[in-house]
Image (cartoon, rainbow, N blue to C red):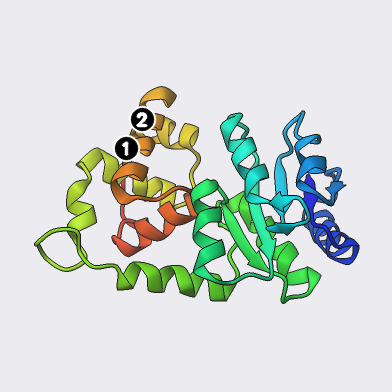
Amino acid sequence: MLVLDDLAASRAWLSAAAKAAFPAAAVVEAGTVAQALGLLQPAPDLALVDLGLPDGSGIEVIAALRGAGAATVCVVATVFDDDAHLFPALRAGAQGYVLKDQSREPLAAMLLGIVDGQPPLSPSIARRLLRQFQAAPPAAAGAPGEDDQEALTAREREVLGLIGKGLTVPAVAQALGLSRHTCAGYVKDIYRKLQVGSRAEATLAATRLGLVGRDAR
C-alpha cells in the first residue's frame, strides 16, 4: 500500500488506518509527487493520495497508475471537499474520496469496505455527488431521469447494474457469459455514454438509474 501526504502526522494517520484495515499488507510512504512516482513499481494494491503536495497534485500519481494499467485502488484523502478538487480526481481514476475529518477507525472501516466493492466516500462527499446528479438537466427530451438509461442498451444496463453491485470486470464477464475483452468494451461505452470516469461515479449512476438491486442475469 502507498500513502502519499506531505505532512508527517497525516501520513502516520493514513498508514495506521490502512494497517488497521489490512494488517498483513506492507505500507510505503511518500511526501511528494516525485517520491510517489518512484514507488509505483511494482504497483501498490491500494494508494491513499493527498491532493495538495509541494511539487504538484496527487492526481498526477493517480493518472500515472491508470495510464500504466495498474489495478491499484486509488483513494483520495484530503481536506478539500469542493467540486474543483472532487471531480477532477474522480475523472483521473480515483475510486474513493475521504476527508481528513475523522478518526482512524471509521477510515479503516471504509477502506475495508473495498473488499466488498464499496467505494470509500465520506458522507458529505457522497451527498455532494448525489446532488450533482440530481441537479443535472436532462440531455434530451423525454421522461425526467430516464435519458441516460435510454442511451444504454439492455446489455449495457446489465453490465452497469453488476458494476453498481461492486463486481469487478472479470466477475461481470463471468456472470454474463462474456469474454473479459468484450465486457471491458461494454464498460468503456457505458463510461462514455454516462460521462463518468471511475467505478465510484458508475456506482452512483447505477443507483440513480435504479439498476442496483435488479436481477441482471
Residue 179 shows up from this direction:
no
Question: How many marks overall?
Answer: 2
Q: Is residue 126 left or right of residue 214?
A: right
Q: Name the residue that disc number 2 marks.
A: 185
Say above or below: 101 vs 116.
Answer: below
Say above or below: 84 vs 203.
Answer: below
Along the viewing direction, whichever of 168 and 14 lies nearer the viewer = 14
Residue 27 shows up from this direction:
yes
Question: Residue reaching furthest front?
Answer: 55
Image point (59%, 72%), residue name: 81
Q: Quick one: label 2, few (<14), some, or many (20+) residues within 10 Å?
A: few
The three-letter code of the residue at mark 1 reads: Asp
Image point (36%, 58%), residue name: 205
Q: Is residue 201 left or right of residue 26?
A: left
Image point (78%, 46%), residue name: 2
The three-letter code of the residue at mark 2 reads: Gly
Residue 77 lies in what quarter of the image? bottom right
Q: Name the residue that disc number 1 marks.
A: 189
